Amino acid sequence: MDFNVKKLASGAGLFFTRAVQFTEEKLGQAEKTELDAHFENLMSRADCTKNWTEKIYRQTEILLQPNPSARIEEFLYEKLDRKAPSRITNGELLGQYMQDAAKEFGPGTPYGSTLIEVGECERRLGAAEREFLQTSAISFLTPLRNFLEGDWRTISKERRLLENLRLDLDACKTRLKKAKVAEAKAACEGEMAPDFHETRPRNYVLSASASALWSEEVEKAEHELRVAQTEFDRQAEVTRLLLEGISSTHVNHLRCLHEFVEAQAAYYKRCHHHMQELQKELGRLPNAFALNSTHPVATAGSASEGVSSPVETDTLKIEEVQAPATGTRKAKVLYDYDAADSSELSLLADELITVYTVPGMDSDWLVGERGNQKGKVPVTYLELLS
C-alpha cells in the first residue's frame, strides 16, 4: 500500500511539474524543443486524416442505417462480442404489407393483383438493400473503423509518449542551464582572495566546496540530458515511421472507396432492373385507373345543343354506339369470356380487338369491336396496347 501511495504521489508530482512546464512554454517563459518542419507536416496530415475519416465513417453509418436506435443496438452487440439479430429492411416490410393487403382485397381484383406484383418487387428491392448494406459494412466501414480504433490509437499513444519525452528533455536542458549558471557564480566567488581581516577563512572553504558540488551537479545534468536526448530521438523516429504510414492508409482507403462505389452501383443497377421488370408486369395487368383517364368528357355545349347520348342510365344500346374519332385503342384478350347477354361481346384468349369508352359507362367495362361485331367487354380480361 505504501508503494502504491508513493507511486501515486510521484506521478502526481510529475504531472504537476509537466503542467507547469507546459504553461511556461505557452507563455514563452521556458525553453521548448521544436520539431523539424517535415515532422510537423506529418503530424498535421495525420490529424487531418483522422478528422475526415471519422466524419466520413459517421456519415456513412447514417447513410446505411438512418435509425439511431438501430445503430446504438448494433454498437452494443459489437462491444458485447455478440451477433446482432437479423433485421428486416423497410422495403421487405412494405412488400409484406402489400401482399397481405392483396389477400384481404382479393388477388383476382385489379388492385389486389397489382399489390401482389408491387409487393414482390419491394421485397426484392429490400433484399438488394440488405446485400448492399452487408457488402458496404465489410468493404468500407470496417477498414475505416479499424484505422480509427487501431492504427490511430497507436499513433496517438506514441505521440503522447514523444510529447512527454520532449518535456523531459527540455526540463533537463533547463536544469543543466541553471547548474552551469550556479557553477559559474560559485567559481567566481572561489577565485576571490580571502580577506582574513574582513571575512572568516571558513567562508572561503565553503565557497570552494560549493563550486565543487555545482561541478558535480553539472556533470550529472549533462548525463541526464544525453540520456533524455537519446530517448527522445528514438521515440521521434518511431513516431515518424508511424506517421509516414498514413500514406499507406490513404492507399488502402482509396481501394475501399472504389469497392464501396462498385457495391453502390451494383445496388442501384439491381433496383433499376427490378423496377423495369415491375413496369412490364404492371403493363400486363388490368388497369382500370388508366382507362378512367381516357374517358371523353361531355361538354356543357353539347348538352345545350340537345345532342343525346346513346348511353342510357340503365341499358346500353350497343347498336347506337359509334366509335369516337379519337381515343380508340387496341387490346389483347387475356382470358376467354362468354357474353352474358346480347349487349356483351364474347372473347377468345390472345385475340386482338379494338376498344373505346363512352360517357356514362361503368369504368369496369369498355366497348369492344371485332370486325362487324360489337359489345361490352370487361376491363380485367384485357391488356391494353399502346
Image (spheres, rainbow, N blue to C red):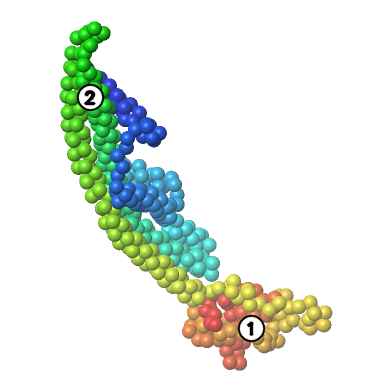
| Residue found 20% across the figure and 27% down from its top | 218
The amino acid sitting under disc 2 is Glu
Note whether 218 is above or below 278 in the view shown: above
* Residue 79 at least partly seen: yes
Note whether 160 is above or below 3 in the view shown: below
Q: Residues within 10 Å of mark 2 (few under 14, many from 20)?
A: many
Residue 11 falls in which quadrant of the image? top left
- Image coordinates of residue 385 in percent, x first then y, are 53, 82
Closer to the camera in the image, 126 or 66:
66
Which corner quadrant holds the C terminus?
Answer: bottom right
Which corner quadrant holds the N terminus?
Answer: top left
Closer to the camera in the image, 301 or 169:
169
Residue 250 falls in which quadrant of the image? bottom left
Q: Which residue is mark 1?
A: 327
- State left or right for residue 381 relative to residue 147: right
Q: Residues within 10 Å of mark 1 (few under 14, many from 20)?
A: few
What SS does tag 2 mark? Answer: helix
The amino acid sitting under disc 1 is Gly
Q: Give residue 183's mark.
A: 2
- Image coordinates of residue 370 in percent, x first then y, are 57, 89
- Image coordinates of residue 149 in percent, x first then y, are 30, 46
* Residue 83 at least partly seen: no
Between circles 1 and 2, the one closer to the viewer is 2
What SS does tag 1 mark? Answer: loop
Closer to the camera in the image, 111 or 297:
297
Note whether 212 is above or below 89 in the view shown: above
| Residue found 18% across the figure and 13% down from its top | 205
